[in-house]
Structures are given as C-alpha cells and as structure tokens.
Image (cartoon, helix red, strand yellow):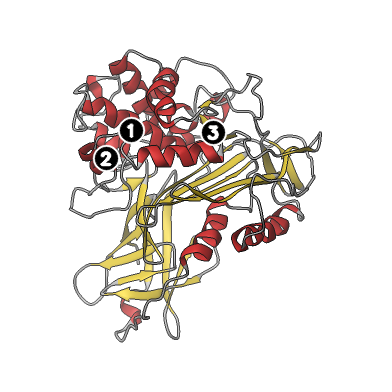
C-alpha cells in the first residue's frame, strides 16, 4: 500500500463496532461477502470504519458503510461520509494538467523551469516526468526533515528549496520511483498557468463537471459535516491520527471525497466529461523509460491486468486514512473502498476480494522453468523509494525465492523467458554471460533497476 504522509502517532484509543445500516437494500451475495469481511476487520479492532461502493454501469451493486466515523463518541459511519483520499488525488491532478494541455497552456514536454523556480542541476525535467514519477527528483515525504515541516504552515516553495538541495535519485526518465514532489510541483504549475488556486481549479473544472457535491480540498481545521475522523495504528491498537498540515499533501494528496462521489468521478473521467478522447488516451498511456521499457504507470493512475481483466487503478494513504479506487473498463465496473484508519486492513485487499467475487479468479496455465536456477541467484542493489534496495534471489529446490533486506523470503513463480513473479511484483533478469548482472523490479508504482552485487 502507498502510505504517503503518515507521521507520528498520538494518544492511545481502542474501539470497534460494525454499522449494519446501509443504503443497500436486500441481501445480495456480494453484500453478504462484504458483511463477512467487515466483521473480521472491525470486530478485531483493526479498523475504525469502512465505506464501499460497487457499481456496474449505473447499476448499484453495493453501497454500504461499516463501523464508526468517531471512536470516542461511538458515532456510526454514514455511507456519505467524506474521507481524506490521499494519493487518489493524483488522478485529479493528472486530469487537470491534461485539461490545461488541451487548452494550449502547456505541453507535457515543457521543461518545468518554464513555470517554477527549481534547480535541476542542469538536467531537463519535463511535466511528463512529474506525471509519471520518472523525474529522478527526491521525494519530499521521504526526507527526514519532512516530519518536522509537516505540522507547520510555511510558504509552499519552502519544500522546493529543501528538495533542490538533494541529489537526484536517477537521471530523468531512467527509472520510476514513486514521488510526491512531482505532483506537488504539478499543483504549482496548474496555479501558474490557470491563474486559479489548485483548490479552485479542481472544484470548478473537475468536481462540478463530475457532479461531485461532497468533495473538497481537505482541511486540518475546518468543521465539515459528515467528515470521518482518522485513526492510525499503534502496537496497542487504534490511536488518533497524527497531525498533518494540508499545505503539504496539496496536489499530491489533499483531496477529500466519498465513495459515491468517486464513482461519479470514474463515470465522468472515463466517459468523456473531463477530457477529450485524444487527451484521455494520452492520460491513460503508461510511461516508457529512456530505454523503451513500458511501465504500468500513466499520469496519476495505473494500468494493469487483474486476473485477465484490464484495470485502471490508484490507491492512497495519508495520516488516518487509506483509499482504493479501481475501474474495469471492459465491464464498466467501479469499486471504491475508503477506510478511516491506517494499519493492517488494506482497502486494496478488500477490493481484491470484491473484484474476484464479481469477475472470478481467472485461469492461466502454469509455466515451468527447466533451466539452471543458480544463474539467477545473487544479491542485487540499487535505488528504491527513499532508500537503497538490497534484494536477495536464492535457489530453492523447485523455484527461486526473493528476500528484501530482513523480510521473510517469498517463493517466485516462473512467467516466461527470464521473468518471474511473486503475484504482485515482476522480476526481470538481464545480462550477458552465464549469469545475470541486472534485476528489474516492477511493482507498478515503482520500476527499479538493480545491479548484481555478488
């Protein structure tokens, strides 16, 4: 899961409850499945509240809420509760940028220094790089200093001055490392070329067009009706979410919405109400790296295959909240899961369960590797998100295993050629000679280039 702005935890609080009230009627098998999942997560105190929307076209398959919006007062979570959606914000920022491209106010291949003051150290960084996490610029949420900055209000360019002191993680376009700095910069560019604040632009050009009447730019201080309170997880249970000033998530993660409003967004975005057809195709085109490698990340949104079904998806995480928004274009199926707590309960895992219930698990003939497993074995190192990665590939009796640092080793299954997978991540080996000297790790939200260390 992509936890983007989670900082310190605060005072201890533990509570759990299932809200059986819902806007769904009847008792469909899908609803019973979700009811069962919610009991597992909420009765154990692992989550505060969960809101779910599943629509196929205009048909409502499920629209329901569970648990609590406020643990201290025991307030049930209404189905129209608004949540901080974290990095689901990025698809709104991406769409806004492409709208301005349609209007001729910018080009995706423009150098960012045309619009903002930032020392790129002589490198050409484009708007396209920002949209696809391929700029190489250091992510500000991974800087040790950010936790101190995150609780204060400073001018927005404070972040730019901090980040530009850091070295690039890689040459622009060489790799893909998830990066909130790029989307923060896009907000500044949107304001520069539109003459409007980011909040105003999104409200007028995205929310209004999509009919999203319960969505807004989040605030750490405003009193907002039906806003769910957020909670983080400590070793002893749920606690109130750590404070975060919304100057900083900004266009990378500061929007708030409801499950039904996000369904409206999916309908508008994917059916011509937000972008023209040609621009929409550009929006959904995954970025290619400098060497021609095609990734799964487009422009604030990912394009992947899920059990044989094309899926357009993005998740998010911010202090006290987790989110998942996915759309299956061939089935016109929308699944949105919002949770007002961070921790072991993942909205993407819930969405997986619902997706499989509706679409099935798919079937694929297993592939078998008949070569020498030892040629892959070794330790591979390179730059990851906010840290240096060390990945150990080991030869097992029947397959390879992968281990990140001190994590538990996982079995890999053979895909084809020199490609392996652990179910979520693809591992592609390349090189010359009898053994491989490079490992490419494709995690959808990151594409890392690692070199053999031994």
Quadrant housing residue 307: bottom left
Q: Which residue is mark 3?
A: 257
35 left or right, relative to 56 = right
Q: CA distance from mark 3 to mark 2?
A: 22 Å
To which quarter of the image does residue 188 belong?
A: top left
Whether residue 395 can be seen here: yes
Mark 1 element type: loop
Q: Which residue is mark 1?
A: 274
| Residue in the foreground of this view, choosing between 391 and 320 | 320
Mark 2 / mark 1, whichever is N-terminal: 1
What percent of the width, then of the height, locates residue 306? 40, 62
The residue positioned 57% from the left and 56% from the top of the image is 350
Label 3 residue SS: strand
* Mark 2 surroundings: few (<14), some (14-19) or many (≥20) residues within 10 A: some
Query: Badges 2 and 1: C-beta atoms under 8 Å apart?
Result: yes
Q: Position of residue 391 (x, y in %)?
A: 42, 62
Residue 160, percent from left and from top: 38, 23
> Does residue 342 lie above or below 82 as drawn?
below
Please report whichever mark, 3 or 1, sits nearer to the chain's N-terminal start. Answer: 3
Towards the viewer: 70 or 8: 70
Q: Secondary structure at mark 2?
A: helix
Residue in the picture at 54% in, 24% down: 246
- Give the residue at mark 2: 280
Q: Is residue 190 above or below residue 377?
A: above
- Label 3 to label 1: alpha-carbon separation: 17 Å
């Amino acid at each position: 899961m992509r936890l983007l702005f989670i900082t310190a935890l605060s005072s201890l609080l533990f509570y759990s409850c299932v809200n059986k009230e819902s806007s769904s009627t009847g008792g469909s098998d899908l609803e019973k499945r979700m009811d069962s999942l919610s009991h597992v997560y909420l009765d154990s105190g692992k989550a505060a509240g969960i809101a779910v929307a599943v629509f196929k076209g205009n048909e409502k398959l499920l629209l329901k809420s569970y648990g609590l919006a406020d643990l201290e007062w025991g307030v049930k979570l209404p189905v129209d509760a608004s949540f901080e959606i974290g990095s689901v914000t990025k698809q709104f920022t991406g769409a806004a940028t492409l709208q301005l491209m349609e209007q001729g106010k910018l080009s995706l291949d423009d150098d960012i220094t045309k619009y903002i003051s930032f020392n790129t150290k002589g490198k050409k960084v484009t708007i396209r790089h920002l949209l696809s996490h391929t700029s190489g610029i250091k992510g500000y949420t991974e800087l040790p200093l950010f936790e101190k900055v995150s609780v204060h209000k400073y001018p927005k360019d404070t972040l730019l001055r901090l980040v530009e002191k850091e070295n690039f993680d890689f040459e622009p376009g060489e790799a893909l490392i998830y990066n909130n700095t790029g989307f923060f910069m896009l907000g500044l560019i949107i304001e520069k070329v539109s003459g409007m604040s980011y909040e105003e632009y999104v409200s007028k050009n995205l929310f209004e067009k999509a009919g999203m009447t319960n969505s807004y730019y989040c605030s750490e201080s405003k009193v907002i009706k039906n806003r769910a309170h957020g909670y983080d997880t400590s070793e002893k249970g749920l606690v109130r979410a750590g404070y975060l000033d919304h100057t900083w998530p900004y266009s990378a993660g500061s929007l708030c919405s409801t499950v039904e409003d996000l369904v409206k967004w999916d309908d508008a975005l994917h059916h011509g109400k937000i972008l023209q057809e040609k621009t929409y195709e550009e929006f959904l085109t995954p970025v290619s790296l400098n060497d021609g490698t095609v990734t799964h990340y487009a422009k604030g949104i990912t394009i992947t295959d899920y059990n044989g079904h094309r899926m357009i998806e993005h998740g998010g995480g911010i202090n006290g909240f987790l989110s998942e928004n996915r759309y299956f274009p061939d089935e016109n199926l929308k699944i949105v899961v919002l949770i007002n707590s961070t921790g072991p309960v993942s909205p993407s895992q819930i969405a997986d369960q619902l997706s499989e219930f509706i679409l099935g698990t798919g079937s694929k003939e297993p592939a078998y590797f008949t070569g020498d497993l030892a040629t892959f074995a070794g330790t591979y190192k390179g730059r990851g998100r906010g840290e240096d990665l060390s990945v150990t590939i080991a030869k097992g009796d029947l397959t390879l295993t992968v281990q990140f640092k001190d994590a538990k080793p996982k079995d890999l299954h053979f895909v084809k050629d020199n490609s392996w997978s652990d179910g979520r991540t693809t591992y592609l080996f390349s090189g010359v000679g009898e053994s491989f000297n490079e490992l490419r790790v494709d995690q959808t939200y990151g594409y890392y280039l690692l070199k053999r260390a031994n």
